[in-house]
Amino acid sequence: GVDAVVDGVDAVVDGVVTVVDGVDAVVDGVDTVVDGVDAVVDGVDAVVEGVDAVVDGVDAVVVGVVAVVDGVDSVVDCVDAVVDGVDAVVDSVDAVVDGVDAVVDGVDAVWLTVLMLWSTVLMQWSTVLMLRR
């Protein structure tokens, strides 16, 4: 009887170790997604710097507005295109963040399962210790 309980506890411990390995793999996946988010954010920063440069160009053109109205219109079109690009990148970042949130929720669920399994292991060990007395 006690040996069977010990074998059962050992099997549960092996299962918990397997789950923990799975959690580590999920955490590695989250790290990869976070690295991707960082890369997208770096891209957004580069686009924002481009927008700043275009805005600086618009400021320079505005000084001579009377003579270069056509140039201002062209720069404004360029700014609109860059802003549209920034909006698209922000939408992409939002989608990635939503994905990260979903992965984090999954990791939380796995950790809850691990904690419940450990609770079961502790109860089984408690039973084994009581039976050995």
Image (cartoon, helix red, strand yellow):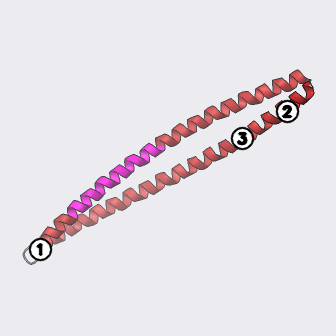
Q: Position of residue 64 (x, y in %)?
A: 9, 74
Q: CA distance from mark 1 to mark 2?
A: 82 Å
Q: Amino acid at mark 2?
A: Ser
Residue 127 percent location from the top left of the image:
88, 32
Stretch in magenta:
33-54
Q: On screen, 119 above or below 78? A: above
Main SS, magenta region, reads helix
Residue shown at the point (42%, 45%) measured from the top left: 36
Q: SS for tag 2? A: helix
Residue at mark 2: 126
x then y, percent, for residue 6: 83, 24
Q: Point out the frontmost of discs 1 and 2.
A: 2
Point out the residue furthest to the left here: 67
Q: Residue at x 47, y 51 (%)?
A: 96
CB-based contact (under 8 Å), mark 1 and mark 2? no
Residue receiving disc 1:
63
Which image quarter is the C terminus in? top right
Secondary structure of the residue carrying numbered label 3: helix
Q: Is residue 79 above or below residue 95?
A: below
In the image, what residue occupies the spot 86% across and 26% down? 5
Q: Amino acid at mark 3?
A: Leu
Q: Which mark is residue 28?
A: none
Q: Is residue 61 magenta?
A: no
Residue 126 is drawn in which quadrant?
A: top right
Quick one: label 3 or label 2, which is nearer the N terminus? 3
* Amino acid type at image mark 1: Val
User: How many labels sit on residues?
Assistant: 3
Residue 48 shown in magenta? yes
Residue bearing mark 3: 115
- Which image quadrant: the N terminus? top right
Pick out the residue farthest to the bottom.
Answer: 66
Q: How far apart, in angstroms, are the residues tagged by discs 3 and 2?
A: 16 Å
